[in-house]
Amino acid sequence: MNRLFGELIALLGDDRVVLELASREQLSKDFYWYSPILTELLDGKTADVIVYPLNEEEVKRVLSLAVQHEVPVTVRGAGTGNYGQIVPLQGGVLVDVSRMNRILDIGEGYVRVEPGVKISTLEKTLREQRQELCIIPSTYAKSTAAGFVSGGSGGIGSISWGLLWDGNVIEATIITAEAEPRVIRSRGDDLLNYIHSYGTTGVITEVIYRAVPRVEWAQCIASFADLEDSLRFSETLAQDESIPKRSVSTCEWPIPSYFRPLKKVIQDQKHVVILEVDEASLELLQPLLERYNGTITHAIPAANYMKGQGLAEYTWNHTTLWALKADESMTYLQGSFSLDRYMEQIGLIKAKFPDEFYNHFDWMRSGGELIPQQIPLVRFTTKERLYEMIDFCESIGVKIFNPHTYLLEEGGWEAHIQRVIRTKNQNDPKGLLNPGKIGLPLKAPSV
């Protein structure tokens, strides 16, 4: 390993090769601590060295050295993932791409960027040019372009534009882990081998995102005395194509009580729907609010969009973060409910776990289909009780994407895992890219 350290320093210089323990420990973590199960499994896992490449050629040379020495490689963007995606289970080299942060090209309907560009910087730049990204994560302030592709799936905007693989990533440039790394330009269906694959199939050095015309988004909180009213309002709004929207997030009480910075605008015992809608269409909300007994109790005009903390930072898995800040016993699940029976499913869950399961829906589309997507808050007592909740949800038709595992195939990617394994075998023949994140056999058994 010392020989590898020397070669990395010769390649990148002392200032871009980090061996100091405290830095290695800090950069080897993401937000896996949302899960008490992952905390137990991943605490203490640390890279042996951190490197900071500045361009694609340096990435290729780092990978070539790692392959020659048969040392694992894990790639880090900003570390905003929740499942230990960037935690190096077997040590090795952690490649931090945060200094590869240039916006390379903007055209009508697309933007081409290096992997370490922050989503917030990218969105701000696009909006200045009258465009915007189709979807952004709730962690957009810190998350990076390639980090979102490698570890994410959906986010703010998914209510209208779907998930990353619904055409929202146009192309990704991939570097393989071989003695002589190859450059692959992945487009179309082939992107499923790289999106949300935790960097197990290659290292992303460029991303082309789809962009769409900018909308003036107003942010609102709608309050409801009845949970079903809040959900029916959300469903109706989600289906109404006459009202452009970027976010529809429904939170059952007491979840809103965890949003401490919003304390002055949150009404006691009220369920809320956090909205981003076209400011020009706000008046179209009123009939829906009246129909479902709701009231707008807080609003932020479009002129203040992305200036300071926005309401989007209380949606998706940011909701879990606020809950954990208020109550350390909370954790979360992820699940897709059935549009035709989600109210029934909610009723069954609440009857069985009345004080342990709190509903939080981020409505979205996948392949054009509207889905009541949940990131519910659950009160953690034991691992056994948590898996009892998971088993019950699945027994009533709720598809759970388990956030308490770092294994790709156990977290909801099982439908694509065999093609990911085939790609990994082609691009990473020695199995050095983020090893341990796929639990299934990577090589076909010999006959």
Image: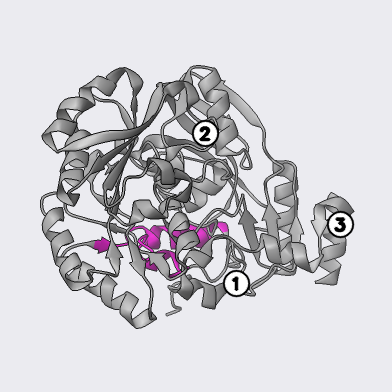
Q: Disc 1 vs disc 2: which is toward the camera?
A: 1
**Sooner in the amino-acid sequence: mark 1 or mark 2:** 1
**Magenta region includes residue 298:** no
Q: Amino acid at mark 2?
A: Ile
Q: Residue at x 87, y 63 (%)?
A: 6
Q: Secondary structure at mark 1?
A: loop
**Sooner in the amino-acid sequence: mark 3 or mark 1:** 3
Q: Secondary structure at mark 3?
A: helix
Residue 438 located left or right of residue 189: right
For label 1, the residue is 89
**Crowd tier of the residue under label 2, counting other residues whose Cα lies within 10 Å: few below 14, some 14–19, many 20 or above:** many
Observer-nearest residue: 410 or 126?
126
Residue 114: name its quadrant. Answer: top right
Q: Residue at x 42, y 57 (%)?
A: 320
What range of the chain is rendered magenta?
399-427
Q: Quadrant of the C terminus?
A: bottom left
Residue 112 horizontal/vertical position (percent): 56, 30
Q: Whole-Å distance between the Cαs marked 2 and 3? A: 31 Å
Tell me if label 1 and label 2 are in contact, CB under 8 Å: no
Residue 175 located left or right of residue 60: left
How many numbered marks are there?
3
Residue 287 horizontal/vertical position (percent): 15, 26
Q: Residue at x 46, y 61 (%)?
A: 326
Residue 208 is marked as 2
For label 3, the residue is 9
Q: Whole-Å distance between the Cαs marked 1 and 2? A: 30 Å
